[in-house]
């Protein structure tokens, strides 16, 4: 049997595949029309777009169905997750219910900035009256802030305290909030200057998000939560997860989650540069995991240096944390210099035990991420 002899059969099979693919596209379009209607219904009653229980149940059912049909459950889950992501986008386009129609206007100070724009867009799509206050508008700030039901400070960390100090004349019923990545200092300043409801917010996402579905907003209680709870409900309607935490505990966690991570990444990028590393060669010779690490390093250096400088320099206590990190780095380096493999293995095992079940969870999650990263790799 040669290529010519199988050509008719091959063409017939390919035609069948093309027909099936056409049906798939038509089914996907039909599914999207249905999810759009779901979004419209949810919008009318204020239901959150993201329903984790429904999603988990659906994935479990379809994985079981796939196994019974002799299809890879991982493939089906991957397809379904992409479909769900698309359906969330279609539901997002339907707009959102306005949780509090009586709140008055919402003023976002720094609303033209990258993160501020995200909130301005979502509030407007929920039917709120929104005004933006920028640096050039302060001569007219009394008029802009008059009658505000919510004021959100969305300015760089280095300007946050100064801006908050200008807000002493807000109505006692007005909610004052900030969205900076440090919380103890802004919360203290807001409580000092404003006698009404106060809440500290830390959106755990960047300005490139298309919506808040599955995004986390950390909240730090300030004053009168019963008066600002509707605002948190609005975030949940948008699809966000609310994670409440004490302001001090937040800043201590961020010193490890953000400050140490950014500082280490910057130091590594600086090291690569000063060593004269050939980035194109490193990329070509990288395993998927190292390529992903390089992507994360390069991604940081493609952004605003002042933003990351502000985060790292935001709290002097961060210096002590970074010194402890440097000490542990040198401690491990000494084991390598001395050739003490036993000490190194012991340390590794201790850290592995400390991670516990999370080590295996992160291993599986990273495998999925690496598969996605490999699919996106450009030849």
Image (cartoon, grey):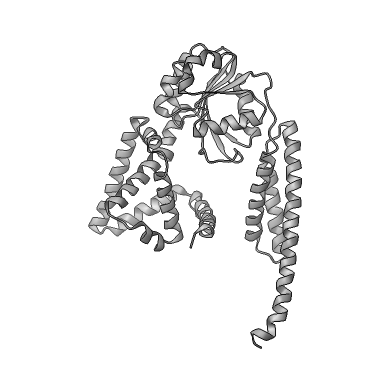
Q: Is 300 on the left-hand or right-hand side of 54?
A: left
Judged from this view, the residue extending furthest toward the bottom is 1
Judged from this view, the residue extending furthest toward the left is 338
30 lies above or below 146? below
Residue 55 spot, x, y in % from top left: 68, 47
Q: Residue at 30% across / 59% down in the picture?
A: 341
Residue 106 spot, x, y in % from top left: 59, 22
Instruction: Count numbered badges in the picture.
Output: 0
User: Can you see residue 217?
Assistant: yes
Front in this rendered view, residue 224 or 312? 312
Q: Quadrant of the N terminus?
A: bottom right
Image quadrant assignment for residue 135: top left
Q: Is 99 on the left-hand or right-hand side of 141?
A: right
344 lies above or below 133? below
Residue 66 spot, x, y in % from top left: 70, 61
Q: Residue at 47% across / 17% down in the picture?
A: 138
Q: Is 141 on the left-hand or right-hand side of 2?
A: left
User: Can you see residue 243?
Assistant: no
């Amino acid at each position: 049997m040669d290529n010519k002899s199988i050509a008719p059969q091959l063409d017939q099979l390919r035609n069948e595949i093309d027909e099936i693919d056409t049906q798939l596209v038509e089914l996907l379009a039909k599914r999207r029309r249905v999810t759009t209607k779901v979004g419209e219904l949810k919008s009318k009653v204020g239901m959150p777009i993201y329903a984790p229980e429904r999603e988990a149940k659906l994935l479990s059912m379809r994985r079981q169905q796939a196994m019974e049909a002799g299809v890879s459950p991982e493939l089906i889950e991957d397809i379904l997750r992409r479909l769900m992501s698309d359906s969330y986008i279609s539901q997002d386009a339907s707009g959102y219910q306005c949780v509090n129609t009586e709140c008055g206007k919402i003023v976002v100070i720094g609303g033209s900035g990258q993160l501020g724009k995200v909130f301005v867009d979502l509030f407007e799509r929920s039917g709120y009256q929104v005004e933006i206050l920028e640096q050039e508008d302060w001569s007219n700030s009394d008029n802009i802030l008059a009658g505000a039901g919510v004021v959100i400070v969305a300015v760089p960390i280095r300007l946050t305290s100064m801006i908050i100090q200008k807000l002493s004349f807000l109505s006692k019923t007005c909610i004052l909030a900030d969205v900076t990545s440090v919380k103890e200092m802004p919360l203290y300043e807001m409580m000092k200057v404003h006698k009404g409801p106060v809440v500290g917010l830390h959106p755990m996402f960047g300005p490139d998000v298309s919506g808040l579905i599955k995004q986390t907003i950390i909240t730090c209680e300030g004053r009168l939560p019963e008066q600002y709870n509707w605002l948190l409900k609005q975030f949940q309607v948008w699809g966000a997860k609310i994670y409440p935490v004490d302001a001090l505990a937040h800043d201590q966690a961020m010193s490890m989650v953000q400050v140490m991570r950014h500082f280490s990444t910057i130091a590594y990028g600086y090291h690569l540069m000063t060593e004269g590393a050939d980035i194109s060669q490193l990329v070509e010779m990288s395993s998927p995991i190292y390529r992903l690490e390089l992507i994360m390093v390069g991604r940081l250096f493609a952004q605003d240096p002042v933003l990351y400088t502000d985060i790292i320099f935001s709290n002097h206590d961060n210096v002590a944390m970074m010194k402890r990190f440097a000490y542990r780095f040198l401690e491990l380096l000494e084991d390598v210099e001395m050739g003490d493999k036993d000490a190194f293995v012991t340390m590794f095992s201790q850290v592995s035990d400390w991670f516990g079940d999370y080590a295996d969870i992160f291993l599986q999650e990273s495998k999925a991420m690496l598969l996605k990263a490999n699919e996106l790799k450009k030849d």
